[in-house]
Amino acid sequence: MIRAGIFGATGYAGHALLDILTRHPGVEVAFASSETYAGKRYCEVYPCAHEHVLVVPDAAPLDDADVVFLCTPHRASAEIGERVLAAGCTCVDLSADFRLHDVAVYEQWYGQHPVPELLPEAVYGLTEIYRPHIAGARLVANPGCYPTGPLLALYPLLREGIVTDERIIIDSKSGVSGAGATPSAKTHFCTVAENLSVYSIGHTHRHVPEIEQELCAYAGRQIRVVFTPHLLPVMRGILSTIYVTVDPAWTPERLLALWRDAYAGEPFVQVLDGGALATLAHVVRSNRCALSLAPAGGEGEYILVTALDNLVKGAAGQAVQNMNVMLGLEETAGLL
């Protein structure tokens, strides 16, 4: 039985992760940590059945764990990750600390990196694309919630070399849980309810360098994104619309076939039939990412539509999927 620890267990991603690990047939939870609620039972923090007593992060018993998940903020995660690896555990980091390969790019967006020497070892954990590298890895950087859907949609097209754009427009709308468990004026019920707002526009959102890093790697050339995130008045889910121009010889049927071929046998990528468009209802509370497309009217112009649950495929579910691959378990174990 695999023993798993969670740092930052009382955030929304940590809560979703604890739910998944508790039902995982091959995992026992070794510890769950929280700075704020240490000493309390988990069910005293959230209305749930989890009885784990939360521990102070510095007192987390790493010797009792085989794998550790970091649901902690950037920079803090890197420092904890160094301790986790030194203790001989494998590590899945849900923060941004190990996603960017270039330390200079990281420091432009997040400040000084605490352990840049670990960046070359970290594997970017978009499981469907990097599975061979994830298997047996010690350190996996779980992708961000916003990048996951667009990256899965665009990977087959860029790999095939049929995208003619150097700039790709991505418009994404997320449920409020994507903002994290710490409340703010922008996420207050009275601000969010019956409203739709935009934020971090103009190439300023911290997921931009992650998206561009991956798209450039897939294409083998420079790709720039215009990324606009929105806040939806729902609890969870991300719907993204991606505007792209491809070689006019590629019909909708041919593009769908390309997706189906790229993701044949993938349990968590759902390619919708022509004419159907992805919605949050396709994916909420599952580890699936739904892909769909529609012609945009101009020659070779398409709108790709993706949907996923930001707390599952966008965070905790993908983290468990990566753990399963890292440790040689059934990839779908514990996941819906």
Image: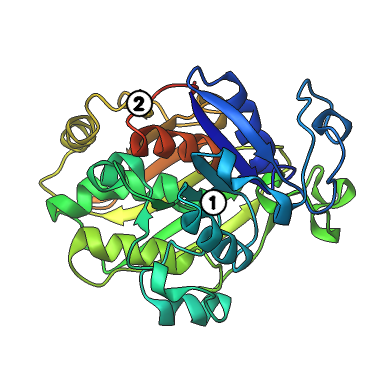
* Residue placed most toward the observer, 306 or 17: 17
Disc ID at residue 94: 1
- Percent x, y of residue 155: 26, 49
Query: Is the residue 178 above or below the residue 73 in the image?
Result: above
What is the x, y in percent for residue 130? 27, 47
Taking the spot 56% from the left edge, 31% from the top edge, the residue there is 280
Query: Furthest-left residue in view?
Result: 249
Q: Is residue 84 above or below residue 106?
A: above
Residue at 51% x, 34% y: name it.
317
Amino acid type at image mark 2: Leu
Q: Which mark is residue 272?
A: 2
In depth, the one of 75 and 16 nearer the eye is: 75
Determine whether, in the image, residue 138 is placed left or right of residue 72. Answer: left
Image depth: mark 1 or mark 2 in front: 1
Instruction: State the image quarter where residue 306 is shown.
Output: top left
Instruction: Identify the image quadrant of residue 136.
Output: top left
Name which residue type carries label 1. Leu
Q: Count neighbours of disc 1 (C-alpha within 10 A) and say few if under 14, some if 14 to 19, many if 20 or more.
A: many
From the viewer's side, name the closer residue of 311 and 329.
329
Residue 87 as seen in the image, left or right of residue 247: right
| 53 or 297: nearer the viewer | 53
Picture coordinates of residue 318 (x, y %)?
A: 46, 38
Spot occupied by residue 51 in the image (x, y as percentages of width and height): 79, 25
Q: Is residue 171 visible?
A: no
> Which residue sits at x=51%, y=64%?
97
Identify the residue at horizontal 27%, vertical 45% (top origin).
Answer: 129
Asked if disc 1 and disc 2 are in contact, CB closer than 8 Å, the reply is no
Q: CA distance from mark 1 to mark 2?
A: 28 Å
Residue 207 visible to an observer of this rendering? yes
